[in-house]
Amino acid sequence: MKEKLKKWLGIDKKSLYVQNYFYAVNMRASIYMSAIVIVLEIWMILHLTKTILELPPGIAKPFAYYFHKYYLNYLVLMGSAGCMLTCSLRFLKGRKDNSTIGTVVKWIFSFICIYFGLTISYNDYAKGEQILTFLTMELFVVCLLTWRPVISFLILSSSYLIFYFRIDALPPPNGTEIGTTTATQINMFTMYLSTLMFSFANYNRTLQQAMKDENLEKLNTHLGNLNEHLSRISVEDELTGIHNMLYFRNEAEKLLGYVTTDKSNIIFLFFDIENFKSYNEKYGFHEGNELLIKIAHMMENTFQGSLVSRYSDDHFVVLTSFEGCEDKIETLSHEIKCCQGEVHLDLKCGAYRPDESETDPSLACDRARFACNSIKKHYDCCYQIYDKLLENRFQLKQYIVNHIDTAIENGYIKVFYQPVVSTQSREICGLEALARWKDPNYGLLPPGAFIGILEEYRLIHKLDQCMIELVCKDYQYAQEHHLPFVPVSMNFSRLDFEVCDMSDFVSRMAENYHVPHNFLDIEITESALTEQQELLQNAVKNFRNTGYKVWLDDFGSGYSSLNVLKDYQFDVLKIDMKFLSGFTDNEKTKPILTNIVNLSRQLGMVSLTEGVETEEQFVFLRSIGCHRAQGYLFSKPIPLEELRNKIEAGELQIASEYLSAH
Ligand code: C2E
Ligand code: CA
Ligand code: CA
């Protein structure tokens, strides 16, 4: 209630915005008001002077009389209007004067206006004239300017009362009655009420507008903050606070596009912190993040004035000038080593120098990254520039990723078969299907050229599925043409099981091409089995439950060979060829191989040694009871046709159990 009353009277506390708004409205209104007053007063002075000059000499009074009675009033009013005008103009021009000065001037000016109106109209009334000057001045002050209602009320009430009592004390013009007439009283009261109402309405309108503007302003500030926030997060890396790749690509693209950019002096750098994963494992995720933030800022400090962004995980990219960049990389590498703790962190950097025609920063980053990846695990090397050799490798990589689908569709993927022989009979008891890419541009590509890339891009399942189908087709062809066929083992990647349901796919193919399950074997490399254990354990179980044999490939090549044997059940243990590499010189080879073969027997697995190149190796393997052997001694991987020719020529024999077609 109290608040409402305060509000109604206009004595409630106003926000700074509203106070300033009122001040601005008044300053603007004062311009017109003071300008009109000045013009009016000049006119009055001129008019009065003319009248005085035209008076016949005897009648004219001394100048002092006129000065006191008229000129002084005019000059005072004109002076105050001049001050008011100066204040308003200064405000409009944006001068930050103290608002109390403006307010005081406004008060003085208003007071003088009303005083002037009062005196002039009092004189006029005494002469029987109308009281228009008083009314005009009242209107000027309370309606052009905006006052709080209580102030308008005080100004109007006091001035009207003073005026009323003054004219009421005058002898009336007709000389009969004393004081004002009833008509004058009513007229004055209505005038008073209407100016009061008008001033209230004016105040309320201005207040409404001020509040509306204030809300808009608040909303704008809010939106502005939001926009600022949005634009900041769109260019900032969330974790490290340095720029993200969106920003990097945009800025780099601009830089590459400028004609003024000296491209011969710029270089793209791609950084990888090798072993960062181990750091995370040892110290935890939080510490890992802290270190990344630290490294990000070290990068920014080292490459001041360059474009520095986080690429992903523990990878960063920098666009900087070529001159002196190697020294900076070295400094950075040294700084990072200082915060590595007990984990050995190694900074690797790949660099790419764009040529004149280069416009795509993403491709430039890819190239620098490619150069960086080429020195992974090269402990003596931390910096590699993208050169012609890498260029060729990079292009082949792009080609492989972009053309795997067409290669499959166009039949460029071929199956080469390498025989597996029984050590007892030397006869073929199996074939390993090995992929080859017979490309019209690149010629015959070995798997080493594309398997890793397809794995990196998670496309390997496409190739493996294609291989499965091709093998099944070869089986079907042999069936239809009454040709002998032996079980085929196929290589699977760990990623095959992550991307699709491989056992389901193999079964569908076997069904489509009527291949008995015991004619398809699954090879999984040992290194694949250390991650995603549950997924792979289930996959192995599934295959075995549906009648496929699962082989452990490359046994002994990884770090946890024995654990793999403990956690999984395999049908065939394929001993890695590196055990045979030191066969003649290393005396430990034989006992190791003997023990692996024994172990495999004890665990109920068939043993197979790959990479057999000499008769001596073969004889030894047979002597220790290794069941099967595979290697160049018998045959390299070759197309099926060629293999059949060899068999026909008597160079190779098929185990009798497979001789008649199934
Ligand atoms: P892997 O499964 O260990 O295959 C054996 C590799 O050793 C083959 O190389 C083969 O040609 C080679 N090799 C066989 N006998 C000898 C020998 O006596 N001496 C020497 N020095 N090497 C021998 P290849 O065909 O180049 O295959 C390389 C690797 O590519 C394979 O190793 C396998 O891991 C992978 N791979 C091949 N085909 C496929 C496929 O269709 N899918 C998947 N996922 N991987 C495949
Ligand atoms: Ca294999
Ligand atoms: Ca192998």
Image (cartoon, helix red, strand yellow):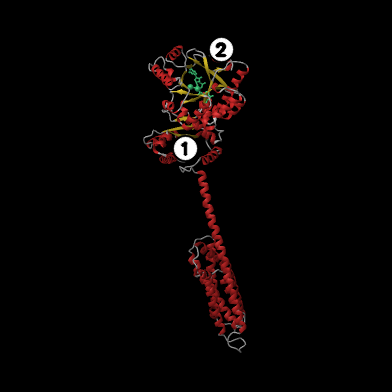
Q: How many marks?
A: 2
Front-most of 273 and 319? 273
- Label number found at residue 313: 1
Q: Inspect the image, locate mark 1, and give the three-letter code of the amino acid beneath it.
A: Asp
Front-most of 76 and 621? 621
Confirm whether residue 63 shows in the render: no
Report x, y in % for residue 161. Answer: 54, 80
Q: Is mark 1 within 8 Å of ligand 1?
A: no
In the figure, is residue 336 to the left or right of 633?
A: left
Q: Secondary structure at mark 1?
A: loop
Q: Nearer the viewer, mark 2 or mark 1?
A: 2
The crowd level at tag 2 (other Cα within 10 Å; few <14, some 14-19, many 20+) is some
Report x, y in % for residue 323. Answer: 46, 34
Report x, y in % for residue 136. Answer: 59, 74
In the figure, is residue 468 to the left or right of 597?
A: right
Q: Inspect the image, locate mark 2, and give the three-letter code of the amino acid beneath it.
A: Ile
Quick one: label 2 or label 1, which is nearer the N terminus?
1
Task: Give the Cα separation between the discs numbered 2 and 1.
Answer: 54 Å
Residue holding disc 2? 647
